[in-house]
Image (cartoon, rainbow, N blue to C red):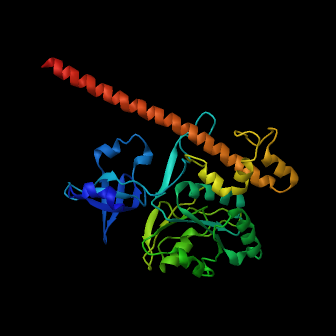
């Protein structure tokens, strides 16, 4: 829970709890072995950013003496998985204009990709950047290995672009390969399952839990797309003491990050080449002395890999710009409220 962050609240008689589900203005909280529903305190409802609101995995502070359980504060997050908000407001350029926090305080993110029509190395690269940016540790699971005769070749292909990230081949439906996941299911740690609809996340969760925790549905054979059987994020305990968050399939995965660390961790070979470019701000397009383009010409760097890098770089640059604008707007809103409060106080003072 981050004892040092909770200590001031504990002295006030408040209680720490973990968010296990959220939706419709209600939050299911787990404190010890007791699960209770809670709502937000008024000051949290006025949060300047949706990112400040509780999400599954958060540790929150509650007031048990209040009329109904109320969330008074969200404790600082160790890790934060976020993407550019899907389906929400878009900018004039058609890009997402805000972030969506997917889960918090995650130790290990399991990126699940089906070895059927779901297989997409470029999408796995985007997930890797998202996970690295969050501060969590990635693990890649290539599921439905029983449906793919080239499963081990696919594994080798992903290992070549994952640079040390564990890559496992499983069949969640049949139970094959699940023992390879055991080293990552450490007691007290939190995992999250990420991937497209139909990749097998819920089936994998049911196998790990030893019981049916989430409903599943077959993938459409016509288009190879999964059906959203998981409609919300939820945290489940596993028999060995680990905790796992299941998430709905992500149809859109636009990145939203604060820096370049995630990008450079996903593309370490391009990051190393970029340091040898003639210009420090080289965009690796047509600039002279570009070591990245030289590697592309020499055949030591794949064109698809560079294209993926440049797309991610553009998304992150856009989100960084949006965050600057959002900060300025939030700051302006805060000072406007302060100014109004001062004027109100002055009017009251003058009346007296």
> Taking 8 as reference, is 212 left or right?
right
> Taking 29 as reference, is 260 left or right?
right
Q: Position of residue 206 (x, y in %)?
A: 51, 75
Q: Position of residue 282 (x, y in %)?
A: 73, 40
Quarter of the image for residue 138 reads bottom right
Q: Residue furthest right?
A: 298
Q: Quadrant of the C terminus?
A: top left
Q: Is residue 286 above or below residue 77?
A: above
**In the depicted view, which residue is nearer to us: 182 or 244?**
182
Q: Position of residue 80 (x, y in %)?
A: 48, 55
Q: Residue furthest left?
A: 352
> Taking 151 as reference, is 205 left or right?
left
**In the depicted view, which residue is nearer to us: 178 or 298?**
298
Q: Position of residue 13 (x, y in %)?
A: 20, 58
* Residue 168 seen in render: yes
Q: Residue at 66% across / 65% down in the picture?
A: 220
* Residue 63 seen in render: no
Q: How many marks?
A: 0
Quarter of the image for residue 336 reads top left
> Taking 134 as reference, is 303 left or right?
right
Q: Quadrant of the N terminus?
A: bottom left
Q: Residue at 44% across / 66% down in the picture?
A: 235
Q: Residue furthest top?
A: 350
């Amino acid at each position: 829970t981050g004892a040092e962050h909770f200590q001031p609240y504990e002295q006030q008689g408040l209680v720490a709890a973990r968010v296990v589900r959220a939706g419709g203005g209600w939050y299911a909280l787990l404190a010890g072995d007791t699960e209770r529903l809670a709502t937000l305190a008024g000051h949290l409802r006025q949060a300047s950013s949706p990112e400040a609101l509780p999400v599954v995995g958060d540790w929150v502070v509650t007031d048990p003496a209040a009329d109904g359980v109320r969330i008074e504060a969200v404790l600082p997050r160790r890790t934060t998985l976020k993407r550019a908000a899907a389906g929400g407001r878009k900018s004039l350029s058609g890009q997402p204009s805000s972030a969506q926090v997917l889960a918090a305080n995650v130790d290990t993110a399991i990126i699940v990709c089906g070895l059927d029509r779901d297989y997409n190395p470029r999408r796995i690269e985007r997930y890797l950047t998202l996970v690295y940016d969050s501060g969590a540790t990635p693990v890649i699971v290539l599921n439905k290995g029983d449906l793919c005769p080239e499963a081990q070749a696919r594994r080798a292909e992903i290992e070549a672009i994952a640079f040390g990230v564990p890559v496992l081949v499983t069949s969640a439906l049949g139970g094959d390969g699940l023992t390879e996941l055991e080293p990552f299911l450490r007691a007290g740690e939190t995992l999250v399952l990420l991937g497209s609809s139909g990749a097998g996340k819920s089936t994998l969760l049911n196998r790990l839990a030893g019981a049916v925790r989430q409903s599943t549905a077959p993938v459409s054979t016509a288009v190879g797309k999964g059906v959203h059987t998981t409609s919300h994020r939820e945290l489940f305990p596993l028999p060995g003491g680990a905790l796992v968050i299941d998430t709905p399939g992500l149809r859109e995965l636009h990145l939203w990050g604060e820096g370049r660390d995630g990008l450079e961790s996903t593309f370490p070979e391009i990051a190393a080449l970029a340091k040898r470019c003639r210009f420090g701000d080289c965009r690796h397009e047509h600039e002279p002395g570009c070591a990245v383009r030289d590697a592309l010409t020499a055949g030591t760097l794949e064109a698809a890999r560079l294209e993926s890098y440049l797309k991610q770089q553009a998304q992150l640059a856009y989100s960084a710009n949006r965050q600057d604008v959002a900060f300025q707007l939030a700051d302006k809103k805060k000072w406007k409220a302060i100014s109004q409060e001062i004027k109100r106080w002055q009017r009251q003072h003058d009346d007296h």
